[in-house]
Image: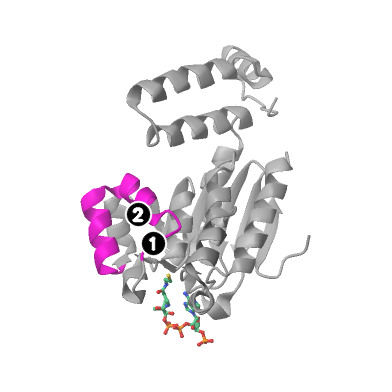
Amino acid sequence: MTYETITVEKRGGVAVLTINRPDKLNALNKQVHREGVDALDAMRRDEEVRVVVITGAGEKSFIAGADISEFAGQTPVTQRDLFHERTFFNSIDTFPKPVIAMVNGFCLGGGCELALACDIRVCSENARFSQPEINLGIMPGGGGTQRLTNLIGEGRAMELILTGDMIDAATAHKFGLVNHVHPAAELEAETMKLAEKIAEKAPIALQLCKEAVKFASRSSLDEGLRREVDLFAICFSTEDKQEGVSAFLEKRKPVFKGK
Ligand code: COA
């Protein structure tokens, strides 16, 4: 499938998915959701892809939120249907391989929610974050009230969501909203370095790690600990576990195959 609102570029084991509507600051319209879901489905099946990096085209914006022009025609029923369908947010959340948000500017509303659905967030010093929905008389609907709260705590999430205030990269880092902040000129190289480091690991173990960590905020501690033991046991069925252990004992670098 060819895309109009996104691009996908494979660089070794890392696929870079770029939202490509720079004239609209990469706002998320229905087509971006559709194409994003489709691209992730294809990358889910593509064994060469070990890690996905999501970013926005241009230097100004990662994603400036949902496309506000589409809100005008939405009724409660159509809007609810849209977000109950497979959205870009849900597709990222359920994507089995690691996903890194490379945030290169405005990261607002649905853009912040999309970054929150990713596993790791890396941003440039000029990045700005907010959940400004309240200024439009609405509220976050792409997971913001839940994922932001899980990530940075209720007090901070509540203030950001109730005020719609924008915070800078340093504050986002202090809050734990982003893992790393880099000068804009170094963002891509540093993000790729991180992505490539993860892409070298055993793919099945990565997938199981991701599932276990995500389960932590969605279950009780007892359920989470039980799930972890089960997933840990599954690792022992893989060729990559044999390879990892043998490589350690033979004092060489492991070569993981995702089997
Ligand atoms: N939806 C639709 N279009 C958007 C958009 C959005 N979320 N954010 C920006 N755009 C469009 C603008 O309408 C403008 O299009 P135009 O040139 O056809 O008029 C273009 O992107 C550039 O944006 P502009 O507002 O001119 O840039 P700026 O530098 O003056 O301001 C922002 C940047 C991010 C502060 C401002 O665009 C903004 O507040 N955007 C909306 C953010 C928001 O509320 N997002 C949450 C939605 S729920």
Query: From mark 1 to mark 2, how far is it between C-alphas?
Result: 6 Å
Q: What stretch is highlighted in magenta?
A: 139-166
Residue 12 in view (yes/no):
no
Disc 1 Cβ-to-ligand 1 distance below 8 Å: yes
Of residues 145 and 202, the one nearer the viewer is 145
Mark 1, residue position: 140
> Amino acid under label 1?
Pro
Going 39% across and 56% down the picture, which residue do you hit? 144
Give the residue type that dot 2 points to: Thr
Direction from residue 44 to residue 122 in the image, left or right: left
Viewport quadrant of the C terminus = top right
Q: Give the number of the disc on residue 145.
A: 2
Image location of residue 14, percent across then percent down: 64, 47
Secondary structure of the magenta portion, mostly? helix
Q: What element carries label 1?
A: loop
- Picture quadrant of residue 215: top left
Q: Which residue is drawn at 72% across and 65% down?
A: 3
User: Where does residue 37 sit, x and y in percent of width and height?
Assistant: 64, 54
